[in-house]
Amino acid sequence: MSALELRPSSPARRTFLAASGSLVVWFSLAPAMRADAQQPGGAKLPGSLEKTPTLDAWIRVDVDGSVTVLTGKAELGQGIKTALVQIAAEQLGVEPTRVHLVTADTSRTPDEAFTAGSRSLTDSGTAIMHASAQVREILIARAADRLSLPAEKLQARDGAIVAEDGRTLGFGELATGATTAIATRANAESKLKDPRSYAVMGKPVPRVDIPAKVTGGIAYVQDLRLPGMVHGRVVRPSTYGARLADVKSDAVEKMPGVLKVVRDGSFLGVIAEREYQAIVAMRALAEAAKWDAGAALTEPSSLYDFLEKTPSNAMVDLDRRSPGSMPAVAKTVEATYRRPYQMHGSIGPSCAVAWLKDGSLTVWTHSQGVFPLRRALAEMLRLPEDRLRCVHGEGSGCYGHNAADDVAADAALLARALPDRPVRVQWMREQEHAWEPYGPAMLTRARAGLDATGAIVDWQYDVWSNTHSTRPGKAGSLLAAQYLATPFVPSPPQTIPLPEGGGDRNAIPLYSFANARVVHHFIPAMPLRVSALRGLGAYMNVFSIESFVDELAASAGVDPVQIRLRYLEDPRARDVINAAAARFGWADYRKPRSHGRGFAFARYKNLAAYFAIAAEVEVERETGRARVIRVASAVDSGQVVNPDGIRNQIEGGIVQSMSWTLYEAVAFDAQRILSKDWSSYPIARFPEMPDSVDVEVIDRPGAPFLGTGEAAQGPTAAAIANAIADATGVRLRELPLTRQRIKAAIGV
């Protein structure tokens, strides 16, 4: 299986490299680059090289001339496997087909923490680009020594170092000749190729992860099958915090195929030879279990009152006001916006495989942070970290902190109870829906002052939100660990500091309002289990800000595109707005009956990709149904590695955000979660897809990589809301913008 490393254990990375005849064995020939070498002026290393500064952690050239690239980031469907291969191939001078990429694996790759925040290329891509360029120069220096030529007379091409006179030395030939492995530290500066010479980067190379996904191949952790593998299922209560009072398991233990019933406090599971046997046994075990009552939930009807009135920590994110020089305000506009709890809604329920063998545990997982997960599992199992390996494999649906880490904990506990056989655990649909950590509910309030000309002279924005990350690192973040006989307590919820931000991500508008104040009201109390959902608070904040900007445009009688350009000084921001408007045909648009158009813009986190979008929506007055007809957009992600990969991410982000915006909300009552299947948690289906989604990718050769994966979430929501307002003449401010809400708003 190419997607996953199947060995249950592996030697330490340096031992493996030294034994493999890899390039690292002769890095000692470059003494100026040894790990203890000082960088000039203490210069910061690029990207993730700052944390993992040795080249052998990132690049390996083997004696057969093949190249292995290692990254601590995980492929989530965003296409980084392809992009990282392109980066390495370009800088090394090899064909992409000769590059083998190893993704997040605690025994082999650098620790890059989480794959989150659209930082894969910014962190790992930058590190690999510079490491590859520096390895190329080491290869050239080695060849120059062997050929007795100046390095300037040599170049890397097609996996070899080529001289002007035609002599060549293959990478494999240059990767031999020494026996001692010495770590080689990266330099702060690299001799990067001129972007004008690129042959691989910037090109639409086919995605390496797609073929297996569309042909029924082995693509996901869910597909993993190991020799002698057995199947586990876990029983969970119907309410948060319920404790297992009693269970009569004798009959279950005698069921066909059942190998073991596992109980540790309120953690209850079963292992069987076959998957369906485990499912049948799980259901029988659930019937036999008796639970004490769990904690009550907030009444859904008072959710937003709860958010506003519950004690919170008010943090001033921005205060750009000069009270003594405040212009006269002729008109004040205010609006409040609401977002419900929303799911990741992974199409494939979370899955993991764990194998305890010879006292060491290997876990195959679609966690977005294999190293933090390893720390949490080690704490939960009271196992030294060096006896535990986590290997990433793709999950069938994620972009955020879903139940991947929780199911890994389930599998680890069941594998501990049945050593020497791999144990595969997959959650049931109702478990995934009811127990995954949701995207938090949020409340925002915007107030702006306009002068007599309609100019925005004052801006006030407040956001109320829970934490947006309860990811692992500690055992208490794992659901199973909270239910053990000796339970682990979740860590107190924390904010994520700006500029990344959590609930206040993108709460500070990029617009140059002369007077502005932004306050983040952080709410520690969490009625429902929450964590990171794609975009974190940016989805809601951009929805709110960009909806409000449209409301201000309407109040001032200004075109929505023009009002944005008026307050933007960044030329790259203006470029994406102009490009999206042009592709949509904004200036020449003639509105058909029941149609409306909407526009929105944001720079993700105010430091990543620039994105602008225009959407056309049709609203059926009789039913309230809103359908997105077409979308035109533009994105600036800096240096483009794979334009198709960027389009894939933007198109996927638009579709997912459209689904959130029009359909998705977690249903619950005072006792339990009610959304347990796709009928009680509807998502967009194929008939709801737009007729066209147009994405213009603006390339910035030589510019830093900017994250793309989450750039579309917030602007898409606002563009749809603005289009619905244009079509109906009524502004909706509570998500999702369902047909029931639209119908009620227009009075049909």
Image: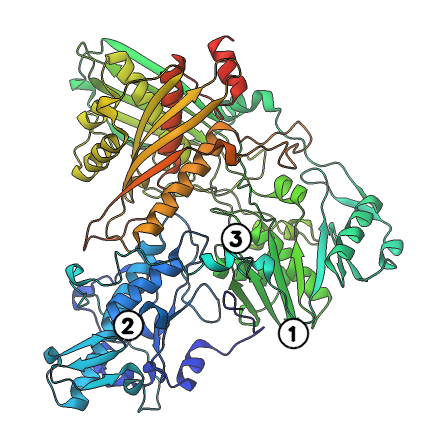
- Kind of residue at badge 2: Val
Mark 1 lies on a secondary structure that is strand
Measuring from the top left, give residue 209's x and y in whole percent. 45, 59
Residue 340 against residue 259 in the figure, above or below: above
| Residue drawn at x 36%, y 55% as measured from the top left | 120
The residue under label 1 is 357
The residue under label 2 is 94
Res. 553 image quadrant: top left
Res. 82 image quadrant: bottom left
User: Disc 1 versus disc 3: distance between alpha carbons?
Assistant: 24 Å
| Residue drawn at x 48%, y 54% as measured from the top left | 368
Considering depth in this image, is 31 or 555 the residue closer to the camera? 555
Considering depth in this image, is 295 or 268 the residue closer to the camera? 268
Q: Which mark is residue 530?
A: none
Considering depth in this image, is 618 or 85 the residue closer to the camera? 618
Which callout, 1 or 2, points to the residue nearer the camera? 2
Which callout, 2 or 3, points to the residue nearer the camera? 2
- Kind of residue at badge 1: Lys
The residue under label 3 is 472
Locate the N terminus and report the quarter of the image it occupies. Answer: bottom right
